[in-house]
Amino acid sequence: MSDAELVLRSTRVITPEGTRAASVAVAGGTITAVLPYDAPAPEGARLEDLGDHVLLPGLVDTHVHVNDPGRTEWEGFWTATRAAAAGGITTLVDMPLNSLPPTTTVAHLRTKQRVAADKAHIDVGFWGGALPDNIKDLRPLHEAGVFGFKAFLSPSGVDEFPHLERDPLARTMAEIAAFDGLLIVHAEDPHRLASAPQRPGPKYTDFLASRPRDAEDSAIAQLIREAKALHARVHVLHLSSSDALPMIAEARAEGVRVTVETCPHYLTLTAEEVPDGASEFKCCPPIREAENQDLLWQALADGTIDCVVTDHSPSTADLKTDDFATAWGGISGLQLSLSAVWTEARRRGHGLEDVVRWMSARTADLVGLRHKGAIEAGRDADFAVLAPDETFTVDPAALQHRNHVTAYAGRTLYGVVKSTWLRGQRIVADGEFIEPKGQLLTRTD
């Protein structure tokens, strides 16, 4: 047997080859071997018998707004990473906006890294930001280790992060393609949004009409055209419009380097169930109808959509007014993402292997973290231990998020995270947290 300091044993271990009974040996924070279930633990190794609880690779969430520094009353590295750990997430990549400063220069990246260094309960990486006036900063940010660059094609909601019009988008994409970087894009067409009916007030149907599917579809078409011309790598953020799926599939068949994510709220919540005035459900693009949701699930199953990430974008409760036009747009769900997706996935006949593929393996691949995202020798010993058949009812006050506002309040979810492990160290078990042990990651790690 391989040398080991720790052995985790379970009747259900999810590996790249499938789910099986196994013993997972760990030394120096790394998985050294995945062995038969009844393999004897080496002398001196600590054995953790997990029984029938499922051992998953820790989730990798590549779309999180931590808002630290600058808007830490909304969230922060301490609370965000605790919430992530409680939900089985062991790695997150922080978005470049909603913090002050935004991550648009190397100096701003260093500020974020200093703030996060002693607060991170899990591993944390960073996206850079692409603005109309910071093309000169993109290559230095890439060399400093950001995982790629976030851009908006429509207003972002914060003045310090303006969106890219057509010509700046082309110039930005050409610059990033020159060093084979990754451009990740909030794709909504501002002109289609401007021409949509704008009726302020509490009615969710009015808000939904103000963010039509064709705004997403038009922006994604533009993105695909530019990526095809430049042979650039692009990633569509938080896809909610199922109408865009055929063009994405066609672009891939033509060799366009485009990947796509969606989010738990698009997969588990529907427009028909959103109460008027309940702006905890507001996000952009919006939660759409049930028939649209069915097509998103089909696209996950056939691979047109690559992965599932939270787009955790919290705010203080006072910004969630009952006017959908003016309320802050963002869903708070970092701690609940695994359970929310698993609850709906099992109802639709998917297994935990599928959830791991969407929320760990493919997200790790997206950002090039080859040592994350799977239980196999040589990977980081990052794990979530899940009781998949146990349920709980979401109590916002019991969540680790800084602000206890969530669209999942009162929902009964399957999948209780029993413990979370980072590089072979248990960082949370049954709601008890160990001191922060996260590391700051860069693209070259």
Image (tube, helix red, strand yellow):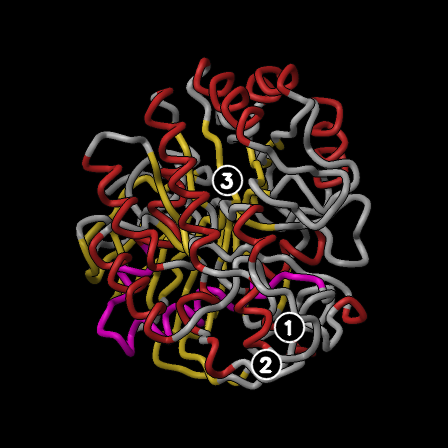
Report if the CB atoms under discs 1 and 3 are less than 8 Å apart: no
Quarter of the figure with the N terminus: top left
Which residue type does callout 2 highlight? Ala
Which residue type does callout 1 highlight? Glu
Of residues 58 and 250, the one nearer the viewer is 250
> Image quadrant of residue 293?
bottom left
Q: Magenta stretch: residue 341 in it?
A: yes
Residue 61 appears in view:
yes
- Residue at 75% x, 23% y: name it: 107
- Element under disc 2: loop
Q: Position of residue 353 (x, y in %)?
A: 26, 60
> How many numbered dots are placed on residues in this image?
3
Of residues 270 and 10, the one nearer the viewer is 270
Q: Which residues are magenta?
A: 328-356
Report if the CB atoms under discs 1 and 2 are less than 8 Å apart: yes
In the rendered structure, find residue 185 and report the number of the disc placed on it.
3
Tell me if 418 is positioned left or right of 18 in this view. Answer: right
Q: Residues within 10 Å of mark 2 (few under 14, many from 20)?
A: some
| Most frequent secondary structure within the magenta stretch | helix
Q: Position of residue 202 (x, y in %)?
A: 67, 79
Q: Residues within 10 Å of mark 3 (few under 14, many from 20)?
A: many
Residue identified by numbered label 1: 280
Nearer to us: label 1 or label 2:
1
Q: Position of residue 437 (x, y in %)?
A: 62, 46
- Residue at 57% x, 55% y: name it: 195
Residue identified by numbered label 2: 409
Question: Reading the chain from its start, which is encountered first: label 1 or label 3?
Answer: 3
